[in-house]
Image: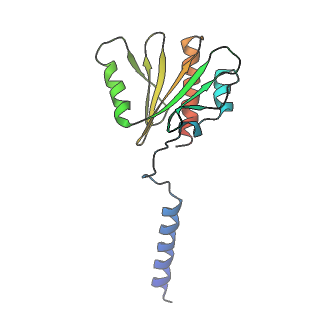
């Protein structure tokens, strides 16, 4: 085998190995919200024990809800969204109504807190995937936002 043929063979082999190891940019978006967070992760973010995530209906798995097991009423939801939903919520905040969108750095490709003074959720996107994390609890809004940020980063680690 000539040195040119051997060199070309090695280059082709490296290209094939690199392509096989690279993450797919065309990967299908997740369709099971409950698979992206564990009860332990949700409980740690909230500071209370939570049960297994549940779906709104058995066939719609893009929204998952975790409820505290302590009877204190904490709830977390994760909703997988389209990029259109992501943009629509952001745009609705610009209309001057009672909701706002506050950008957050360091979470996915783009993220923002969306809501009012009393109720807020974190909406993030990475590539072609968007999701919303919401904490419903009787705790200060800053603590809810911190829990939402923690959970959003955990979701992103699976995407």
Tell me if residue 17 comes above or below residue 79 in the rendering.
below
Q: Which corner quadrant of the image does residue 126 belong to? A: top left
- Residue 125: image quadrant is top left
* Observer-nearest of 16 and 53: 53
Q: Nearer the viewer, residue 7 or 94?
A: 94
Residue 84: give x, y in percent of width and height. 34, 34
Q: In the rendered view, would you say 67 is above or below 19?
A: above
Q: Which residue occupies the extreme left position in the image? A: 95
Would residue 21 appear left or right of 43 to someone viewing this image?
A: left
The structure residue drawn at horizontal position 32% and vertical position 12%, both measured from the top left corner, is: 97
Q: Residue at x 43, y 52 (%)?
A: 25
Q: Position of residue 64 (x, y in %)?
A: 55, 31
Relative horizontal placement of residue 55, taking residue 97 as reference (left or right): right
Does residue 80 lie above or below 24 as drawn?
Answer: above
Q: Residue at position x 40%, y 42% from top?
A: 128
The type of colouring in the image is: rainbow
Q: Residue furthest front?
A: 58
| Residue farthest bottom in this picture | 1
| Closest to the observer, 140 or 19 | 140
Q: Is residue 155 left or right of residue 93?
A: right
Residue 42: percent from left, percent from top: 63, 28
Total marks shown come to 0
User: Residue 61's x, y, as percent?
Assistant: 51, 37
């Amino acid at each position: 085998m000539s040195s040119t043929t051997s060199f070309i063979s090695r280059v082709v082999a490296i290209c094939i190995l690199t392509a096989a190891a690279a993450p797919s940019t065309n990967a299908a978006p997740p369709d099971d919200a409950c698979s992206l967070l564990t009860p332990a992760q949700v409980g740690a973010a909230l500071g209370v024990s939570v049960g297994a995530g549940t779906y709104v209906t058995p066939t719609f798995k893009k929204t998952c809800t975790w409820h505290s097991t302590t009877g204190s009423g904490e709830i977390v939801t994760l909703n997988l969204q389209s990029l259109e939903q992501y943009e629509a919520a952001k745009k609705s905040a610009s209309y001057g109504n009672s909701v706002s969108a506050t950008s957050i750095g360091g979470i996915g490709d783009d993220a923002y807190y969306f809501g009012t003074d009393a109720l807020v959720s974190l909406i993030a996107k990475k590539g072609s995937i968007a999701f919303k994390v919401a904490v419903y609890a009787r705790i200060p809004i800053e603590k809810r936002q911190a829990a939402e940020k923690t959970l959003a980063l955990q979701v992103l680690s699976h995407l």
